[in-house]
Amino acid sequence: MKHSLPDLPYSIDALAPVMSKETMEYHYGKHFQTYIDNLNKMVEGSPYEDMEIDEIVRTASGAIYNNAAQAWNHGFFFSTLSPEPVEMPETLKERIVKDFGSVAEFKAAMTKAATTLFGSGWAWLSEDKDGKLVISQESNAGNPITKGHKPLLTIDVWEHAYYIDYRNVRAAFVENVFGIVNWEKVAGRL
Ligand code: MN
């Protein structure tokens, strides 16, 4: 199976100033593309050649896992953003209030996960096996589907995600990302 770069659901410059066109040209156009290209090269002639990307992420390890999971994570990340503000649907709000106390407490916990993750990785909101919403930090190419969780939202905190626009200030990037989340997409994954 040949993996390909998914189209963005908005134009390449639509997320500015939260993510500038230059950031997107590198992040989506180069980093994401490279994970896809590496994955295609690595799976050729391997047991992973005909697998869907989800199955590769669940079953592979090493370099194949890293490239498959980074491709999966980036597709998920970019598809969950919107240049137009999207209100959080009540269905999601109720679940967040139930498991975190309030939307503000959820945002604070997700921000803490994203800003305190040491090195490269991802902050995730997922639904665990018991149906509880949980926040987790995953280093490098980590992905909650390997633990049987259902991912709902992620924030990429690799330096390539923010260094052009925010230099070293990861916290400002994370705060601004909350303003471009497509909450309807997040709610639709419940
Ligand atoms: Mn990235």
Image (cartoon, rainbow, N blue to C red):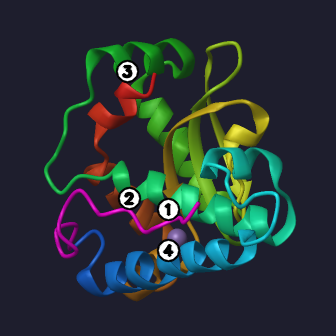
Asked whether the beta carbons under mark 3 and mark 2 sit within 8 Å of each other, the answer is no
Magenta region, residue range:
1-16
Left or right of residue 37: residue 130: right
Left or right of residue 100: residue 5: left
Residue 12 shown in magenta: yes
Residue placed under numbered mark 2 in the picture? 78
Q: Helix, strand or loop at disc 4?
A: helix
Asked whether the beta carbons under mark 1 and mark 2 sit within 8 Å of each other, the answer is yes
Sequence-wise, the earlier of marks 3 and 1 is 1
| Circle on res. 32 | 4
| Disc 4: residue Cβ within 8 A of ligand 1's nearest atom | yes
For discs 4 and 3, the disc positioned in front in the rendered view:
4
Q: Quadrant of residue 103?
A: top left
Asked whether the beta carbons under mark 2 and mark 4 sit within 8 Å of each other, the answer is yes
Question: Up-down: is 35 above or below 30?
Answer: above
- Between the C-alphas of marks 2 and 4, the distance is 10 Å
Residue 6 x/y as whole percent: 38, 62
Q: Helix, strand or loop at disc 2?
A: helix
Sequence-wise, the earlier of marks 4 and 1 is 4
| Circle on res. 74 | 1
Residue 64 x/y as whole percent: 77, 67
Asked whether the beta carbons under mark 4 and mark 1 sit within 8 Å of each other, the answer is yes
Left or right of residue 45: residue 143: left
Residue 147 x/y as whole percent: 78, 35
- Between the C-alphas of marks 1 and 2, the distance is 6 Å
How many numbered callouts?
Answer: 4
Residue 68 shown in magenta: no
Residue at the left extreme, as displayed:
84
Asked whether the beta carbons under mark 4 and mark 3 sit within 8 Å of each other, the answer is no
Sequence-wise, the earlier of marks 2 and 4 is 4
Residue placed under numbered mark 3 in the picture? 92
The residue at 20%/33% (across/down) is 87
